[in-house]
């Protein structure tokens, strides 16, 4: 992770998601807990690359984290952890011992320049809102992709569970009303079924469900026309 990405994403989440960020499910889909640790890791990362700038970096982090925490408090979201300077130095020693410092090409030209403000640009009120939204969407898509990879592969043949019948029927009715957008309805259906059953739809499994759904839509249209 390059410098500031976690802090930037947290600010984006606050600006774009707003009050919905207080819900655990939204935090989970955004990977918010992971970002908490990454935010501090970014500071340690930069401090390891910039000897003699440790205190300036810690001060900047305290300011940036403090600003974010005020915003998080208004949303009833737990704050970011801010270590004392002594604890920060101990963590930095462990970081260096574990050799987790990124390669030099990850460091920007101005990173570590004396007097540069490493965090202020991320708190700039003029940050483009569309870019913020795109980063939030990309982050949630990335987190969702990771969750999918952790699921069990879906059965290769269609298995309709009793608790899924209502969802399938409502999706079929919707597909009949929005002709031309059946593929979008199907994708939403598959996503919800996958999340409910912790299934990952790959290749043949997705093809089987797609054929099943198309047949159900066709039968529903025939029944309506009769």
Image: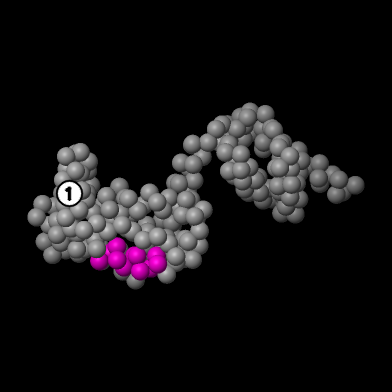
- Residue with the mark numbered 1: 90
Principal SS element in the magenta part?
Answer: helix
The image position of residue 53, as x and y in percent, is: 12, 57
Q: Residue at x 81, y 46 (%)?
A: 221
Front one among 71 and 125: 71
Residue 82 among magenta residues: no
Q: Is residue 45 left or right of residue 11?
A: left
Please say if 82 is above or below 141: below
The image position of residue 69, as x and y in percent, is: 34, 65
Q: Residue at x 74, y 47 (%)?
A: 166
Please indicate, yes or no, whether residue 109 appears anywhere in the rendered image.
no
Where are the magenta residues, as a range?
A: 63-73
Q: Residue at x 71, y 37 (%)?
A: 161
Residue lying farthest to the left in this orientation: 52
The image position of residue 51, as x and y in percent, is: 10, 52
The image position of residue 55, as x and y in percent, is: 14, 59
Q: Is residue 211 left or right of residue 200?
A: right
């Amino acid at each position: 992770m390059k410098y500031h990405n976690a802090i930037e994403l947290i600010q984006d989440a606050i600006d774009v998601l707003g009050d919905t960020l207080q819900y655990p499910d939204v935090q989970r889909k955004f990977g918010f807990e992971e970002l908490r640790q990454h935010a501090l890791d970014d500071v340690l990362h930069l401090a390891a690359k910039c000897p003699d700038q440790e205190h300036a970096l810690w001060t900047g982090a305290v300011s940036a984290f403090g600003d974010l925490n005020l915003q998080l408090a208004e949303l009833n979201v737990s704050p970011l952890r801010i270590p004392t300077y002594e604890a920060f130095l101990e963590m930095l020693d462990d970081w260096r011992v574990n050799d987790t410092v990124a390669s030099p090409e990850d460091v920007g030209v101005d990173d570590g320049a004396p007097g540069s403000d490493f965090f202020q640009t991320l708190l700039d009120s003029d940050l483009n809102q569309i870019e913020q939204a795109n980063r939030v969407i990309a982050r949630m898509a990335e987190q969702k992709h990771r969750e999918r990879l952790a699921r069990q592969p879906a059965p290769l043949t269609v298995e309709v569970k009793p608790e899924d019948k209502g969802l399938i029927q409502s999706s079929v009715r919707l597909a009949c009303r929005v002709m031309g957008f059946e593929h979008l309805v199907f994708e939403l259906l598959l996503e919800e079924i996958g999340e409910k059953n912790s299934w990952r739809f790959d290749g043949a499994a997705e093809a089987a469900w797609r054929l099943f759904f198309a047949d159900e839509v066709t039968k529903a249209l025939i029944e309506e026309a009769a």
